Image (cartoon, helix red, strand yellow):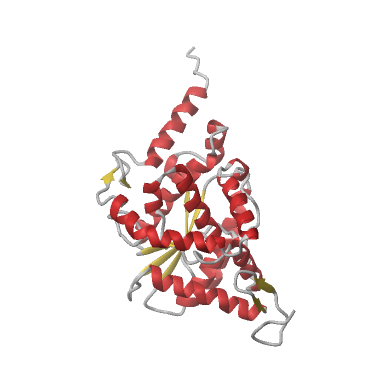
């Protein structure tokens, strides 16, 4: 099949709009939508710094690559890379290496922050303790704190994450099903800047996961394709299956879910957006007196100390 825009062979058929695109026009198609999202989500000014949260996977590496293409040659905008080492066996090592290598080749400042340094724990230790409870819950909370801590240290104005359309639509559905309207109101991109919190934006918000993968491949971006060993225990997997089946039956369903969320977002912010945050003893802003990261890390440390055999005094 030929590309709809030139004589070259198509690399994909965009099912939800009926377009056949070659590699060059597909890359342009993705980047054009990402640029549009960036303009809608943030208001960059000369002298601003952007940080990109990069795991080394296809989505975050594509995000870093696109943002570097857009802003890399601008002297008035700085781009930084933040990578979190959760401490998961050999899983994270590959992603860290890929991210650091890319940053070195593009002269992007690379910042690494470790769970061990912030919480005194690795994710492997946490997973061993929580067992059947989803380790992803702990990992997500810890990772968000780490990113905010290092982003503030760098002095960035905005933090980009690599979440794609699939991730966002799954999060919307999960929070609807759980009835967690307050969390729905806190989903990025963050229009309201809270003291102590670096606002996040989501460049790939309108890019489906399969397009993010194809973009990385056609752009020849190196990325880590390994799957986290704790992913199978995540509740999100059920929603991923449901959303994919829905998309197969009705192409464009994920876009429709996001569009519906966008329409109710102003009401969510007005009714559930908390205007005042407390300050946790760790220094991070929190909805309550103690932030969730401190609460969970203290909970895990207590269990670890309880499991350790008492020392025998001779």
Left/right of residue 25 with respect to residue 192 in the rendered view: right
Q: Which quadrant of the figure has residue 153?
A: bottom left
Residue 298: horizontal and vertical position, in percent? 41, 33
Residue that protrudes farthest toward the left in the picture: 276
Q: Residue furthest top?
A: 314
**Residue sitting at the far bottom:** 7
Q: Nearer the viewer, residue 115 or 10?
A: 10
Residue beneath the point at 40% across and 71% down: 40
Q: Is residue 184 above or below residue 252?
A: above
Number of marks in picture = 0
In the image, taking residue 19 as reference, residue 159 lies left or right, namely left
Q: Nearer the viewer, residue 39 or 2?
A: 2
Instruction: Please say whether residue 33 is visible from this viewpoint.
Output: yes
Residue 24 point in image, percent of width and height: 63, 80
Identity of the residue drawn at 37% across and 58% down:
265
Compared with residue 177, is residue 33 higher up or lower down, i.e. above or below? below
Looking at the figure, which quarter contains the N terminus? bottom right
Please state the horizontal and vertical placement of residue 247, each as a whole percent of the image.
Answer: 61, 59
Residue placed farthest to the front in the image?
A: 250
* Residue in the picture at 51% in, 77% down: 32
> Is 274 in front, or is 203?
274
Front residue (pair 142, 190): 190
Q: Is residue 231 left or right of residue 200?
A: right
Q: Answer yes or no: is residue 53 visible.
A: no
Considering only vertical position in the picture, is 142 above or below 210? Answer: above
Residue at 27% across, 47% down? 277
On the image, the x and y values in percent for residue 49 come to 37, 68
């Amino acid at each position: 099949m030929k590309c709809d825009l030139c004589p070259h062979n198509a690399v994909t058929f965009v099912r939800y709009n009926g377009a056949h695109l070659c590699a060059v026009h597909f890359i342009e198609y993705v980047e054009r939508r990402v640029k549009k999202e960036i303009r809608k989500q943030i208001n960059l000014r000369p002298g601003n710094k952007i940080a990109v949260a990069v795991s080394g996977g296809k989505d975050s590496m594509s995000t870093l690559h696109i943002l570097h293409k857009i802003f890399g040659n601008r002297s008035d905008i700085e781009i930084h890379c933040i990578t979190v080492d959760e401490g998961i066996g050999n899983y994270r090592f590959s992603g860290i290496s890929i991210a650091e290598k890319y940053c070195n080749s593009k002269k992007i400042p690379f910042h690494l922050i470790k769970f061990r340094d912030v919480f005194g724990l690795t994710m492997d230790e946490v997973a061993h303790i929580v067992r059947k409870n989803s380790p992803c819950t702990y990992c997500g909370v810890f990772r968000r704190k780490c990113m905010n801590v290092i982003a503030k240290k760098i002095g960035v104005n905005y933090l980009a994450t690599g979440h794609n359309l699939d991730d966002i639509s799954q999060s919307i559905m999960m929070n609807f099903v759980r009835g967690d309207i307050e969390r729905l109101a806190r989903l990025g991109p963050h229009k309201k800047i809270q003291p102590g919190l670096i606002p996040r934006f989501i460049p790939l918000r309108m890019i489906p996961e399969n397009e993010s993968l194809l973009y990385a491949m056609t752009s020849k971006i190196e990325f880590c394709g390994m799957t986290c060993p704790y992913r199978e225990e995540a509740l999100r997997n059920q929603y991923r299956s449901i959303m994919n089946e829905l998309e197969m039956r009705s192409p464009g369903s994920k876009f429709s879910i996001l569009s519906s969320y966008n329409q109710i977002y102003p009401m969510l912010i007005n009714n559930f957006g908390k205007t005042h945050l407390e300050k946790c003893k760790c220094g991070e802003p929190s909805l309550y007196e103690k932030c969730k990261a401190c609460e969970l890390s203290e909970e895990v440390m207590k269990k670890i100390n309880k499991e350790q055999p008492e020392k025998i005094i001779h």
